[in-house]
Amino acid sequence: MPNLPPLVYAMLLAPLALVLIAAIVKTWQAREARCWPQASGKVVTSVAEVREVRVSDDEREDGYRMESRNFANVAYEYSVSGRKLSCNRISIGEDLGNFQVAEQLAKYPAGSIVTVYYNPRHPDQAVLERDLPKGLWGCLGIGSAIVVAIIFGSAFGLNQSYNWLAHHVGRPDLAGMVVGFGAFGLVIALMGWAVRRQASMATRWPVVPGTIKLSEMEEYHEASEPGESRGVEMFGKRVTYTYSYQNVRYINECARVAAGTPQASTKMLEKLMSRYQDGATVEVHVNPDNPAEATLDARGEGRIAYVLWGIAAVFAALALFVATRGG
């Protein structure tokens, strides 16, 4: 097996590089915020709210779709040079939603007095927490070392596997195919294990009542294929459910359906809704460590693991077939 070209390593390391760049930018912003003056403020609003956020979607013409996520809306007022201002940003870090909603609401209840750090050049820009999480760079350093070790260790291991198989299979020129099938099978099997483990944990999560909610019809165009001026027009709906956990209300999405006509989309939705009717009460399994994460069918999601293991078995069988029969 030839050594991997530098471009392959660059592609594998690109996500890690993006994470490190984002961490550097946030660290620089945090260092700058340390010099910001402070003022006394008061929390005027502290509630959970649902916001529509853009999520990357290559299958759509616009390149994104809208997704409902849970946020802690902590709004506070403060004064700078006699000017009354308000803001609802908590920390320097980006809030992507569905994380620490209850914790932030409990930390900053309505009516509480807080210390506000504001940008002296733009006083309307402020935060309540100007420091990054402790141990951030330590975790990133350990994580980076693990990722690099996995990438280069895997490349070395695959190369050694190829060299060994080249001397033990009927057709040495197919050793690379055997390694490829085996590696794909192993990765998919590990994915199945992770899905099964997560589903097993979800079955032990607390159960609360929830309500199914059906969205209005959404129209959009799929991403166009080469040679097409525009993608196919699609009609779809979202199926979400709302629930409350420890007096905080959340929303989550359980399915999306879409088809080329409103009628076809409605028919697909009717099949899906044979189990979950609009407005129906359902049991929701809630992650106590992050209540914004929940599921309606923990055991059903666990069955996906068997599908992944089946696919892994196919790759393993292909690897064995090529190794013993020589293609």
Image: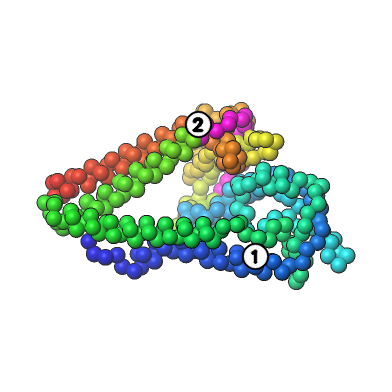
Q: Residues within 10 Å of mark 1 (few under 14, many from 20)?
A: some
- Residue at the extreme bottom of the image, as rendered: 121
Residue 313 in sight: yes
To which residue does mark 2 refer? 203
Report whether 288 appears left or right of 126: left
Q: Is residue 278 above or below residue 159?
A: above
Quadrant of residue 224 in the image?
bottom left
As measured in the structure, the alpha-carbon distance from the residue carrying label 2 to the one carrying label 1 is 40 Å
* Residue type marked 2: Thr
- Residue at the extreme left of the image, as rendered: 170
In terms of sequence position, does the residue under pointer 2 or pointer 1 come before the other?
1
To which residue does mark 1 refer? 30
Q: Nearer the viewer, mark 2 or mark 1?
A: 1
Q: Nearer the viewer, residue 64 or 155?
A: 155
Q: Nearer the viewer, residue 214 or 193?
A: 193
Task: Tell me residue 103's x, y (percent).
Answer: 67, 45
Number of callouts in the render?
2
Q: For the point 25% across and 44% down, which residue is it?
A: 316
Secondary structure of residue under mark 1: helix
Report whether 225 appears left or right of 21: left
* Residue type marked 1: Ala
Secondary structure of residue under mark 2: loop
Q: Residues within 10 Å of mark 2 (few under 14, many from 20)?
A: some
Q: For the point 50% across and 50% down, which residue is it?
A: 233
Quadrant of residue 206 in the image?
top right
Q: Where's the N terminus, which quadrant?
A: bottom left
Magenta part of the chain: 202-219
